[in-house]
Image (spheres, rainbow, N blue to C red):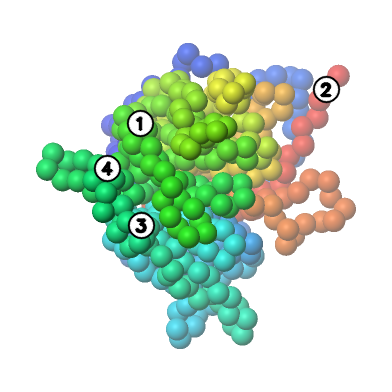
Amino acid sequence: MEHSASFNNNSLSSQRSLASVPSLNSHSHLFIPSTTSHSCLTTLKPHTSSSVYISCLTLAGNLLYTGSSDREIRSWNHTHFIQKPTTTNNNVVIAGKGAVKSIVVHSDKLFTAHQDNKIRVWRVTNLEHDQNQKYTRVATLPTLGDRLTKLLLPKNQVRIRRHKKCTWVHHVDTVSSLALSKDGTFLYSVSWDRTIKVWRTKDFACLESVRDAHDDAINAVAVSYDGYVYTGSADKRIRVWKKLEGEKKHSLVDTLEKHNSGINALALSADGSVLYSGACDRSILVSEKGKNGKLLVVGALRGHTRSILCLAVVSDLVCSGSEDKTVRIWRGVQKEYSCLAVLEGHRSPIKSLTAAVDRSEQDPNSEEPSFLVYSASLDCDVKKCQFCHLRWIKLL
């Protein structure tokens, strides 16, 4: 669960929606949708224990990576949604303590964030003879070298409790989310310890730590193509950071205070011009990037009846997962959004989402692609759904 969320009937469902923010839900008669279709293709049950759930999902190539609440990291061939059994079980690794909170992929490296305050780096090797993958841990961040070099200088020590200090390269609470820069040179991590850290992916060195970036736990991070870093926190704020020309460290560019409850998820549009944020107030805020990185809220997407826990963007679609056990798919035209589909079937809150264009079934003569949406829930299931794209028709 996110730091700001507790799944009971008295908390999230009672959070007020954002009455002061205009709704972007389309009620216009200028647009009509053509027929759309969606179906659940399969349900994966990675764990037999009802107490273990998938805590994060990510797609890379034809592989779906899953991280679970019991420290397990797996990969699956998402085109067939299978994991081929092998005697060596190469497709599964167990690391750390507590849940795996986030997974990102760069080249042949897998970066995983953990509840035990650490980031782990894995080299993925494809085993061509059985189409499986082998994982080799190459680093745990901060690295031993980083820790030793910082330990020698007193200025590198920061106070984390009244009588305890550590070096600034350490996260001292759950690492909640990871994001990569456009070229994969830098890894950004955020934590419930209220810090943002920047790591170099070449040698895994910690280059920067922004202390007290928020007033409460940070739950989400997103990075745009032009280097803007967005963080969402349980303090109800979204903050925008940028390393300005000639500066060595990131500076605060903007603070958005429109949500009235803790922020759980952030996602950027395909071109990076729009930021979507989901919170316990049951609304998805749509914010456009303005001059100098400032955010302008243009409206909210409403429909979920409980907290928004996760978001994913694919092409021009926005997918949202909620504590109300549903996934909604949205599309915007001229700043009006329509909920194209509500995916049901999970028996518990939706914890993580990822989505991709469905290239396996793509009709080369079709102008409209179909999409695959993967959802992981606290019911321990991962569902694979196919959604056929909707085209809006403007009435003149």
Q: Which residue is mark 1?
A: 214
- In-image side of 157 versus 366 (left or right): left
- Say the numbered circle drawn on residue 146: 3
Q: Quadrant of residue 79?
A: bottom right
Badge 2 or badge 4: first in the primary sequence: 4
Gap between marks 2 and 4, in whole Å? 65 Å
Amino acid type of the residue that numbered disc 2 sits on in the rendered structure: Leu
Amino acid type of the residue that numbered disc 4 sits on in the rendered structure: Lys
Q: Is residue 24 visible?
A: no
Residue at image position (57%, 26%) is 293
Gap between marks 3 and 2, in whole Å? 61 Å
- Judging depth in this view, the residue of 351 and 189 nearest the camera is 189
Residue furthest left as drawn: 163
* Tag nearer the camera, 3 or 4: 4
Residue at image position (51%, 16%) is 21
Label 1: which secondary element: loop
Badge 3 or badge 2: first in the primary sequence: 3
Amino acid type of the residue that numbered disc 3 sits on in the rendered structure: Asp
Q: Which residue is mark 2?
A: 395
Q: Which residue is mark 4?
A: 155
